[in-house]
Image (spheres, grey):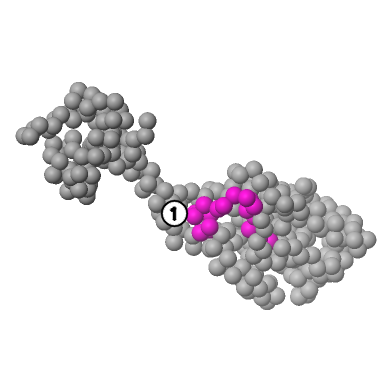
Amino acid sequence: MNITIKQLRAFVAVSRTQSFTEACAAIHLSQPALSIAIKNLEEEVGGQLLVRTTRTLSLTAEGEAFLPTAERLLADWDNALEEVHNRFALKRGKIAIAAMPSFALNQLPEAIRCYRENYPQINVTVHDVLAEDVVDMVRQGRCEVGISFEPAESEDLLFEPLFQDQLVAVLPQTHRRVTQAVISWAELLESDFMSLQRPSSIRLMIEQKLEEQGVTPVVEFETHQLATIGRMVATGLGVSAVPSLCIAQMAELGACCRQLEQPQITRQVGVVTRRRYPLSMAAQGMVQVLRDMNLPTLLEAAAGRMER
């Protein structure tokens, strides 16, 4: 059976108006085209739906029974078209984002604020997870967009760099080296060192880079949250190293950040998406907001405040 939307519209219009002339005006069809649409519909369903005489027009019993179904089908069709139009116009929809904590807590809120100004009807879900979990959630299709370090294995993923992050030293305000603009790893590790717990990619990156220099850091305190590290450093329990993404956050918690070198540890941060799956319009809008934020400039400004 091959019933078209045009046939259904013709049948419903005639049924509502009880007039071929008024139905033609309502759905913008000529009378011959309307008659053909009704005739073809009746041939498809196997019998008469309308009884026509020179003076009257009425529904058959089968037509009366079919009318509510035809009206519902048209309503569903129109609603579906409106829904997809709204999604393409970014007037409705949803997006799930996975972001590593350092970005989720510091830069992502501003990105979402900008996004909501442009697309207020889009529902946004944020998954604040470890960098490794960001990649897994995107790979599994649980999130369209991820913000993380560049993944090691990415044949099935796309990675668009946004900026290059570097680790900075975090010190208590009373630390004896807080007056230095630049601190070496050797100087930092003179104090009790605290770090994120494994399998944090930051922890693994620190250990790998320092081992290349023949240094094995002794971790006195471990935690899952960067905010906890900031507060523990501020209370004088020790020192740490965090992404430069967190400079403003560390300052709010009462700790001081300084440039960290010898070695300088850097890593690209960017947008992770699936290679063979086109992004929804909602997700494309979010990626464009992230591009437009000019994150390198924002981080340079934060680094400038760090040195003062």
In the image, is 30 to the left or to the right of 188? left
- Considering the image in quadrants, where does the C terminus appear? bottom right
Is residue 170 among the parts visible in the rendering?
A: no
How far across and down, in percent of the image, does residue 146 sit? 62, 53
Residue 3 point in image, percent of width and height: 34, 35
Residue position marked by numbered label 1 in the rendering:
88
Residue 251, how many percent across, how many down? 65, 65
Asked if residue 126 lies in the magenta stretch, the reply is no
Three-letter amino acid code at disc 1? Phe
Question: Which corner quadrant holds the N terminus?
Answer: top left
Residue 191: name its quadrant: bottom right
Seen as rendered, the residue at the extreme top is 61
Residue range corresponding to the magenta coloring: 269-286
Q: Quadrant of residue 9?
A: top left
Toward the viewer: 26 or 257? 26
Query: Residue at the spot x=71%, y=49% of the render?
Result: 132
Tell me: 11 left or right of 234: left
Within the magenta stretch, is there residue 277? yes
Query: In the image, is 105 to the left or to the right of 51?
Result: right
Q: Depth check: give the residue in front, 231 or 143.
A: 143
**Viewer-proximal residue among 26 and 287:** 26
